[in-house]
């Protein structure tokens, strides 16, 4: 079972969650140690600019997923 | 009720507001503590580069939403 | 009257001006105090990297507006 | 006469030059003082990261212009 | 044999792996020394912002690859 | 003879090389002095974040070139 079976989601909100997963997966592949990532999360979660940068990665991934789902126009 | 029912908005201005919401939601999911986020807002709201970075995230999200709404061409 | 009635502009230059407006509006919504923004402008307007970052936000917004106007191909 | 009559150019190289112009124009509008910009250029032109950041803005603007010119496929 | 025969992949997950490869290849071409890159990896893998920045590059490359694969809609 | 005759390339790998060329050309136009650029290269080639930033510019340019080549789907 793949962690990324498809870019399709039923709703925009699920698409947003998938965008967050995509953003985190790159970090996980570069830093596989769970303890290190947990410690780093404590750092960036308390830094405004770090959070903004992370939000930007989510935005880029969300754009990709939204395109893949044709912006969920049939759903809305 | 989902916080993101649809990417469709009636007007460009509402689309812009939705872009801001999308930008903030990523931050909220990474830092759920309201007090911490409120404190951080006081920091970045007084730093020129922090505001520019945040404006960039809004720009990316607005691009996605504008595409979803076919740039509101029927409206204008 | 909305500050963003439409993404359509008559010319590329007007589209560029609209891109600047979009870039500034996000900052204004996060820092509504005119005096603070005026002070911050004095900071970033004298910093090369700050100006480059701000130029990048304009570039992203201009891309959106150019797409909305089908790159003004009929005009040119 | 507008500084941006059209996004159309005859060749990719001219499109690249226009991308540089777009990138610089945003800076000029935020810092209209020629002397200040000239001084800042001396700073960022000798800093690797500053140059990379500026190259990124050109890349975004070039993407827009390339799309507007349908990638100059008829030319090549 | 080219390191980049095609942008096509069978699955989204393979597309994501290709996005990581594209991101790393640019670094490799600018810093061909394996030992230096290995040392640098030890640095950025323990820095939250460095990881976020790297995740952003993957996101951009993944967008390109997803478009090339028409978002793997036939697969899903 | 132009340094950028066309965005078309025969293969994805050549497209990637062209993306690197586009990224470097902006830097060259802003810092024409070969010696200075050579010195700066020694700096950023040994800094993880600098390399990531440079990789990001390549990613954006590669997206443009991939679109221009319709993702080389006929080739693969």
Image (tube, coloured by chain):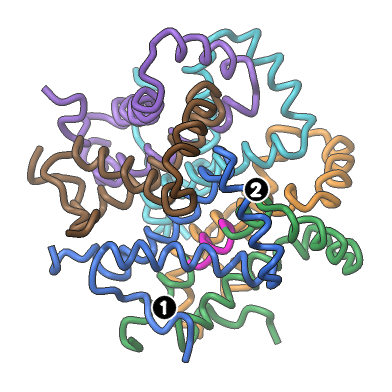
Chain colours: A cyan, B orange, C green, D blue, E purple, F brown
Q: Residue at x 53, y 58 (%)?
A: B6
Residue D6 in the image: above or below residue C27: below
- Report the front residue among B57 and B1: B57
Q: Residue at x 79, y 58 (%)?
A: C30
How packed mark 1 is, by other alpha carbons closer than 10 Å (few <14, some 14-19, many 20 or more), is: many
Q: Locate residue A49 relative to residue F24 in the image: left or right.
A: right
Which is closer to the viewer, label 2 or label 1? 2
Q: Label 1 near label 2: C-beta < 8 Å?
A: no
Residue A4 visible in the displayed image: no
Q: Residue at x 77, y 63 (%)?
A: C29
Residue at label 1? C69
Residue F76 in the image: above or below residue D57: above
Residue A6 in the image: above or below residue D74: above
Dominant SS type (magenta): helix
Give the quarter of the figure containing the N terminus of chain A.
top left
Chain of the residue under the numbered disc 2 shown in the image: D
Kindly state the secondary structure of the residue where label 2 is placed: helix
Residue E51 in the image: above or below residue C65: above
How packed mark 2 is, by other alpha carbons closer than 10 Å (few <14, some 14-19, many 20 or more), is: some
Where's residue F2, x and y in %? 21, 59
Q: Is residue B53 magenta?
A: no
Where's residue D9, x and y in %? 29, 74
Magenta extent: C56-62
- Report the front residue among F46 and C56: F46
Q: Residue at x 62, y 41 (%)?
A: A55
Residue at label 2? D43
Q: What is the distance, in whole Å, between disc 2 and disc 1 at their CAs?
A: 37 Å
Kindly state the secondary structure of the residue where label 1 is placed: loop
Where's residue E74, x and y in %? 21, 41
């Amino acid at each position: 079972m793949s962690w990324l079976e498809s870019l399709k989601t039923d709703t925009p909100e699920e698409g947003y969650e998938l965008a967050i997963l995509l953003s985190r997966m790159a970090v996980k592949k570069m830093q596989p140690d769970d303890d290190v990532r947990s410690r780093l999360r404590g750092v960036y979660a308390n830094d405004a600019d770090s959070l903004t940068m992370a939000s930007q990665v989510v935005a880029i991934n969300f754009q990709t997923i939204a395109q893949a789902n044709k912006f969920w126009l049939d759903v809305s």
